[in-house]
Each structure stands twice: as structure tokens, then as C-alpha cells.
């Protein structure tokens, strides 16, 4: 009897395409996505955009910048990209800070005047000329990587400067070097300078195990430093959008229940058209999704001190457009399915994949560049970007137009496709 039971179960599984997909397709899809993100391949590691401001214009600062440019994990920009073929002026401290605040780059370095006089810091002797590291703390990895690479480049791009300054410190605190010791030190420094000139100050392949601190760095968080639990808004948007998609698909499933019970036939036999019926369901699902967002963000305000009330205009705009997009998405899924079982399986598969590449499960800035671009095909990515602009960067409502436009257009397209698919229920 046991083989017969197993055979019967296998036949049932093969007939239930939804269960079959959840059993095999979904695990493979998730394995592929996370293998690409965490697989450790060098060519999939996202490069960090680094803005450079050189206020010193010394030989030491130029060598440091060249060393950073030669780092494979960095994309160094001393000036903005050309506009209409016109080259833009170099970044200043103010323009670099504004760019980081606007989200154009996660980190910027400002090399101050006087850096070239004593670029290497021994014992905190150079606090007045410390490099300023301007960071956006929503990207928790970029600033730490740049700070570590900065110390490495100081070793590989300026070994003669480090040796020369170290000699001066030893001379100062050891009671003075003898003439023979000075001569040998000068010969060693000359040899290092010749080697540096021959190698082009490129950065080399020195070991990454050297400890930090040979270059003095002062960190300044230009975004979020005065906020209470600023990352709560990111998590509220990321998790919220994912569950809105599930709620919307579930609510849209009422259309399938009505079709199965015969209620839909009676409704369509009246003056109600499929267009007006779908529009009404989209409005209901939009209202339901928006109320869910309101409850979630109010909970974040009450429990986690989220700064909610000062961002009401941006929240309303992003909340309504996001709710509209997810509502039409749910209607589309319901229109494409024939039964509730199919809807449950399809919605689980599609929503989890969208959420994984769209940033609801894992921040997109840590994904490979190809995966980041793929995430732009999801509702999650655009909604999260809009809420981040509102709650994290304190941008005005006018700056939300790209996210709002994409979500509205996506909603309109999804509704049009859903209307086309639902024509099978209309009376001729």
C-alpha cells in the first residue's frame, strides 16, 4: 500500500502546478538570487562611488588620489559627470557634501590644505589637517571600506613619505640621530623614491593586514546624524511593500471567488461592466494598502520614535502611489489565474522574487550592479527609493516625481493588462 500512496501523492503533485512550483521553482530561484549576491565572485562585487575633493593640491595628495583610483573596488570622481558635453568644475567640500546628501554617492573624501606638509599621522600630531570623510550612513559598508582602503593606499602609494615622517618622529623623541644614522636613512629614502617613481605610484599589491590610523581621518555623517532611529523608515518601507503585495493579491482573489460562486456572472448581467468592477476593486485595494502603510508607520512613530509627522506630505504621496501600484498588481495576478490555489502559488513565487531583488529582503546597494538594475523592474525598488528620499534625506515632495511617475505608469499598465485578461468573464 505504501508504494500506491506515494504514487498517488506524486500524481497529485504533478497535477497541482502551484504546489510543484513552490516545491522546486521557488527554492531554485532564491538559491540563484542569493548565490549571485553572496557568491564571492570578484566581477559581481559592486564598486563604491567615491567623491574626492583636493583642497591641498600637493604632491602627496595627488599620489594618494592616484592610489585610490587604482583600487579596483572604487570608482573615484574628482568632478561630476559632464553635462551636454561640458566638463563640470571639480567638487568642493560643499558640493561633495550636497552630492552625498542627495544620494549620488555614499561617501566623499575632503583632503584639506596642509595635508602635504605631514600626510602621515604618528601619535595624533596632525589633527588639524585630518582628511574629512563625509558619509551617508544608510550605506553601512561603503564608508568602512573607504576608510580601510585609505590606510592601505597610504602604505602602497606613499612609502617614502611615511618613512621620512617616521624618521623625523624618531629623531624628535629619541634624542636625535647620529650623522651615520641620518646618512643611512637618507639613502634608504632615496631608494624608496626611485622605486616609487619607477612604479608610477600605482598602489601595488601590499598586504591588507596593516592596521589603520597612519592617516588621520575625521568622519562626518551628513545624512541621518540628527535622526532618531533613522533606519526604521527604511525597514518600514521595505517590509511594508512586500506585505502590501501579499495583501493586495489576497484581496484581489475575491474576484476568483466571485467567478467560482457565480456571483460575478450575476454582477456582470447588470449594468456593471468589467472596467467599472475592476476599477472599484483597485480603489478598494488601494485604500486597504494605504491604511496598512499608515498603521505600520504610526507603529514606527509610537514604538521606535520614527520622525513621522514632519514627513506627512511625502508619506501621503508615496503611500498612495505605492498602494495604487500594488493594488493593480494584485488585480493582474487574479486576472491571470483561474483558481485561488493558482493565485496563492503564483503570488508567493512572484512576490518573493520581486522582494528579494527589489530591496525588501536585502539592501540593493550591496547587490551586484546587474542585480541592482534588475531590481528597478520591481515595485519594491521604486517605493523604497521614494520613502528613503522622504524620511532619510528629507527631500521635498517635488523630488519624488521619478518614483511617483514610475509607480503610476506601472499601475496603469498593470491595470490595462488585467482588464484585457479579465475579458474572459464578460458576457458577449
Image (cartoon, grey):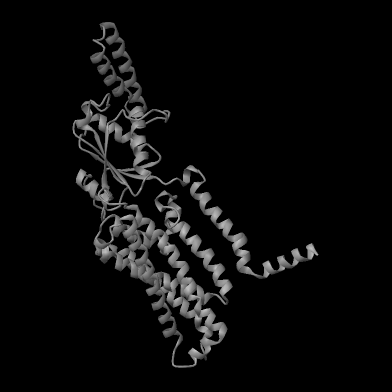
Can residue 200 be seen from the camera position used here?
Answer: no
> In the displayed structure, would residue 165 be above or below residue 309?
above
Using the image, determine if residue 141 lies above or below residue 354: above
Give percent across and percent down for residue 97.
Answer: 24, 47
Considering every residue shown, the one lying at the far front of the view is 303
| Point 53% across, 89% down: residue | 265
Q: Position of residue 359 (x, y in %)?
A: 42, 56
Residue 413, image x and y in percent? 42, 73
| Looking at the image, residue 423 lies above or below residue 17 | below
Q: Nearer the viewer, residue 356 or 239?
A: 239
Indicate whether 133 appears above or below 159.
below
Q: How many marks?
A: 0
- Identity of the residue furthest to the right in this view: 1
From where the camera sits, is residue 307 visible? yes
Question: Residue 50 lies in what quarter of the image?
Answer: top left
Look at the image and tell me in which quarter the N terminus lies: bottom right
Residue at the bottom extreme? 270
> In the picture provided, is 138 more to the left or to the right than 207?
left
Q: Residue at x 48, y 71 (%)?
A: 249
**Which sits in the foreground, 192 or 258?**
258
Q: Residue at x 40, y 41 (%)?
A: 73
Q: Position of residue 126 (x, y in %)?
A: 22, 28
Amino acid at each position: 500500500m505504501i508504494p500506491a500512496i506515494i504514487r498517488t501523492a506524486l500524481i497529485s503533485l504533478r497535477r497541482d502546478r502551484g504546489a510543484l512550483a513552490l516545491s522546486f521553482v521557488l527554492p531554485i530561484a532564491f538559491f540563484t538570487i542569493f548565490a549571485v549576491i553572496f557568491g564571492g565572485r570578484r566581477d559581481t562585487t559592486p564598486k563604491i562611488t567615491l567623491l574626492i575633493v583636493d583642497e591641498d593640491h600637493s604632491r602627496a595628495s595627488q599620489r594618494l588620489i592616484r592610489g585610490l583610483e587604482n583600487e579596483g573596488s572604487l570608482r573615484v570622481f574628482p568632478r561630476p559627470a559632464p553635462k551636454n558635453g561640458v566638463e563640470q568644475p571639480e567638487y568642493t567640500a560643499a558640493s561633495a557634501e550636497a552630492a552625498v546628501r542627495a544620494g549620488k554617492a555614499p561617501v566623499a573624501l575632503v583632503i584639506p590644505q596642509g595635508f602635504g606638509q605631514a600626510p602621515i599621522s604618528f601619535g595624533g600630531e596632525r589633527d588639524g589637517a585630518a582628511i574629512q570623510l563625509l558619509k551617508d550612513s544608510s550605506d553601512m559598508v561603503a564608508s568602512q571600506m573607504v576608510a580601510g582602503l585609505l590606510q592601505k593606499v597610504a602604505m602602497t602609494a606613499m612609502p617614502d613619505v611615511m618613512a621620512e615622517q617616521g624618521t623625523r618622529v624618531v629623531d624628535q623623541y629619541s634624542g636625535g640621530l647620529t650623522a651615520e644614522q641620518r646618512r643611512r636613512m637618507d639613502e634608504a629614502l632615496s631608494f624608496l623614491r626611485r622605486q616609487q617613481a619607477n612604479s608610477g605610484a600605482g598602489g601595488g599589491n601590499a598586504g591588507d593586514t596593516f592596521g589603520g590610523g597612519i592617516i588621520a581621518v575625521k568622519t562626518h555623517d551628513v545624512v541621518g546624524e540628527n535622526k532618531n532611529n533613522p533606519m526604521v523608515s527604511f525597514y518600514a518601507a521595505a517590509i511594508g511593500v512586500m506585505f502590501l503585495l501579499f495583501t493586495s493579491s489576497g484581496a484581489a482573489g475575491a474576484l476568483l471567488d466571485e467567478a467560482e460562486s457565480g456571483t460575478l456572472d450575476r454582477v456582470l448581467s447588470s449594468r456593471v461592466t468589467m472596467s467599472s468592477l475592476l476599477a472599484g476593486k483597485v480603489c478598494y485595494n488601494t485604500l486597504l494598502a494605504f491604511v496598512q502603510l499608515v498603521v505600520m508607520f504610526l507603529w514606527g512613530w509610537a514604538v521606535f520614535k520614527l520622525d513621522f509627522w514632519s514627513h506627512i506630505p511625502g508619506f501621503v504621496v508615496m503611500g498612495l502611489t505605492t498602494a495604487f501600484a500594488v493594488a493593480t498588481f494584485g488585480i493582474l495576478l487574479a486576472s491571470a489565474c483561474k483558481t485561488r490555489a493558482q493565485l496563492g502559488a503564483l503570488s508567493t513565487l512572484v512576490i518573493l522574487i520581486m522582494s528579494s531583488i527589489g530591496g525588501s529582503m536585502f539592501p540593493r546597494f550591496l547587490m551586484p550592479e546587474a542585480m541592482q538594475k534588475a531590481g528597478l523592474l520591481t515595485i519594491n525598488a521604486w517605493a523604497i527609493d521614494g520613502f528613503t528620499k522622504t524620511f532619510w534625506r528629507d527631500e521635498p515632495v517635488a523630488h519624488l516625481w521619478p518614483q511617483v511617475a514610475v509607480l503610476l505608469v506601472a499601475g496603469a499598465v498593470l491595470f490595462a493588462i488585467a482588464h484585457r485578461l479579465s475579458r474572459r468573464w464578460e458576457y458577449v
